Amino acid sequence: MPGTYHIPTTNLIEPGCIKKTGEWTKILGGEKALIVSSPDEYGKKLGKMVEEILSVDGIKSCLYAGAGSNPTDEMVMMGSEEFNNNNCDIIIAIGGGSAIDCAKGIALVARSGKNINEFEGVNKSQNNVPPLIAINTTSGTGSEVSSFTVISDSLTGRKMTIVDWRITPTVSINDAELALSMPKSLTAATGMDAFSHAIEAIVADNSTPITDALSFEAIQLINEWLPVAFEDGQNLKARTEMCHGAFLAGIAFNNSGLGLVHALSHPVTSMYGFPHGVINSLLLPAVIKFNMICSISKYSRVAAAMKVAIPWHTDHENAQKVIPAVIKLIKKLNLPDGLKDLGVKADDIPALSKAANEEIVGRSNPRKANIIMINQIYNDAMYIPKI
Ligand SMILES: [Fe+2]
């Protein structure tokens, strides 16, 4: 709803701030935490780290290392059982978007007695959602600041988008030291997810001067620092600026909405399992081209944020510089040359278009698209234009 802004109450962004998790758990009245992480060794290691930090402040906890990538309804329901069986009163997620999204699902169902499927849509929760602390490790999804969660139906693979202001984490934690070990491919994928959030937020139907300010600063930061973090993962300054950029982009899209990049991206992930941020990157040029006709002045400002605008050129001329600048960024990150290069088959486009047409995240796109237009955008995105 434009004019109403949801963000976490408290946001910690600085190297080493994970050590304040216990302090904030206490402030929120938490006595026993359910820690949610991914099931791999790294996820368990992160979970153990949080357990130790909490124990310093005398807070009990149990680890649910069951939040796999693209979390499912089954993972959420099992996590909810863990929360209740262990008499937990607060949830702490640590990881990327999958761990945090799963934790949000657990928060929704834990005290409701309902199945997660019943929360699909907008604001279906009651006033019984436990507090959630989200510790983000990937600088990309924005899940640590948003009221969105995407949960896959384990039977059909369909992604359910749930938007509920009550699952906006109470505290978000972005500690750049946690991002230092991210491999190049993950740095590129999550960073471009954040970049696509800012680009979509800026032209979305519900954008306002507040979300625009956040988006433009995010675009500037990510365009400058993502290639640096990609080339030198140990660069703490670059990792910190990416925390800032992804955080700003997350708050922007949480309040203005997304658009066709995400609407077209979700079905590709469901069908093929490719990384969300990589698919977004390859869709960006085609979606910007589609939206250009109704967002000239906004894209002209995007060109300025990406430092390719020329002051004496018209808005129309500067707006045309955005697509080449985005492609240049994609090339710096060694991403594929289009959806075809990624492995998407042309024969699947009709089914993908049908699914994308039903995605609620596409409803805030500035230019409305029918299924034929969506089909055309997928076809355009098969090959990134040469620049
Ligand atoms: Fe995203």
Image (cartoon, grey):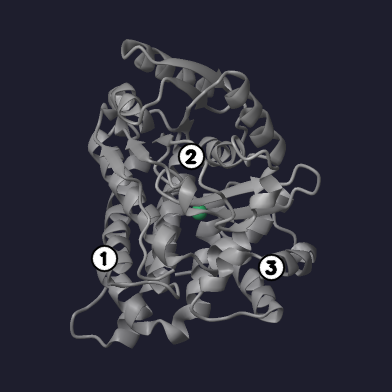
Q: Look at the image and tell me whether residue 59 can be seen.
A: yes
Task: Determine the CA span between mark 1 and mark 2.
Answer: 27 Å
Please name the residue shown 52% across and 53% down the image.
164
**Residue on which the image places disc 3:** 358
What amino acid is found at the position of numbered circle 2 in the picture?
A: Leu
Please name the residue shown 37% across and 33% down the image.
179
With 366 as the anchor, is 362 left or right in this view? right
**Residue on which the image places disc 2:** 186
Question: Where does the N terminus fall, quadrant-wise?
Answer: bottom left
Question: Where does the C terminus fall, quadrant-wise?
Answer: bottom left
Q: Closer to the N terminus: mark 1 or mark 2?
A: 2
Disc 3, ligand 1: is the CB inside 8 Å? Answer: no
Single out the mark in the foreground, 2 or 3: 3
- Say few, some or many: other residues with alpha carbon within 10 Å of mark 3 (under 14 / 14 to 19 / 20 or more): some
Q: Look at the image and tell me whether residue 269 can be seen.
A: no
Image position, residue 250 (x, y; %): 39, 53
Image position, residue 292 (x, y; %): 45, 81
Please name the residue shown 29% across and 61% down the image.
214
Up-down relation of residue 85 to residue 282 (above or below): above
Task: Determine the CA span between mark 2 and mark 3.
Answer: 28 Å
- Say few, some or many: other residues with alpha carbon within 10 Å of mark 2 (under 14 / 14 to 19 / 20 or more): some
Up-down relation of residue 260 to residue 188 (above or below): below
Task: Determine the CA span between mark 3 and mark 1.
Answer: 30 Å
Q: Closer to the N terminus: mark 2 or mark 3?
A: 2
Closer-to-camera residue (75/370): 75
Labelled pair 1, 2 in contact (Cβ < 8 Å):
no
Secondary structure type for disc 2: helix
Secondary structure type for disc 3: loop
Single out the mark in the foreground, 1 or 2: 1
